[in-house]
Image (cartoon, rainbow, N blue to C red):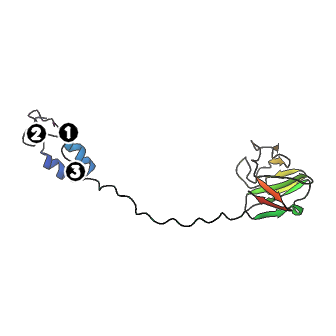
Amino acid sequence: MTPDAMPSRRTVLRAAGAGSAAATVLVSGCGSDDAPGGTTDGTATSAPPSTTEAPPATEAPSTPEAPSTPAAAPSALARTADIPVGGGTVFKDEKVVVTQPVAGEFKAFSAICTHQGCTVAKVENGTIDCPCHGSKYRIADGSVAAGPAPRPLPPEDVNVSAGTITLT
């Protein structure tokens, strides 16, 4: 295209919409000998000044910090007497299962089956059982006793103190 046949910058800006990104891109490659910054061969010698500028950055007004409140104490899951020896209890709302494999030893695991994410339903005969596809986990360590679960139940931290079990 010859310099005479090229549209003027004004025409390109009108067609693309003034201030748009497309206009800025188009304008930066256009030039003519009748416009500032152009040469006789139709190439631009420098990018034209931007028609829109971002507003200057300002800092957000500072607000006084709210007084910090202590974290709420963890609520008790159960009393130790509520967890049967050789069994356990599923806490669906907390998504945790607490077991007592031997007297006085408490373990906690995620109640979410590692097979397809169902919540385990019961603790029976030394296993934590998932109702969806029959996976079973050992109460002592959460390991897989029967598949299709691919991994053991992840352990959860509990605190046993003064006959109370709390999730930490």
Q: Nearer the viewer, mark 2 or mark 3?
A: 2
Would you say 62 lies left or right of 85 here? left
Picture quadrant of residue 6? top left
* Residue 81 x, y percent position in the rendering: 89, 62
Could you say which is closer to the camera, residue 70 or residue 104?
70
**Residue 61 is covered by the magenta coloring:** no
Q: Residues within 10 Å of mark 3 (few under 14, many from 20)?
A: some
- Residue at image x 71%, y 64%? 73
> Which region shows up in magenta?
33-51
Residue type indicated by callout 3: Ala
Asked whether 67 or 79 is in front, the reply is 67
Q: Amino acid at mark 2?
A: Ser
Q: Is residue 128 left or right of residue 59?
A: right
| Residue shown at 82% from the left, 56% from the top | 98
Packing grade of label 1 (10 A; few <14, some 14-19, many >=20) is some
| Rendered residue at 87%/60% (across/down) | 83
Q: Quadrant of residue 121?
A: bottom right
Up the image or down, 1 lies above or below 162; here it is above
The residue that label 1 is drawn on is 29
Give the residue type at disc 1: Gly
Q: Earlier in the sequence, mark 2 or mark 3?
A: 3
**Left or right side of 14 for 78:** right
Is 94 on the left-hand or right-hand side of 145?
Answer: left
In the picture, the quarter occupied by the C terminus is bottom right
In the image, which is nearer the foreground, mark 1 or mark 3? 1
Q: Which residue is mark 2?
A: 32
In the image, residue 112 above or below residue 31: below
Is disc 2 in contact with disc 3, using a CB cutoff of under 8 Å?
Answer: no
Instruction: Give the labeled residue for mark 3.
Output: 16
Distance between mark 2 and mark 3 Cα atoms:
18 Å
- Residue 156 % position (x, y): 75, 51
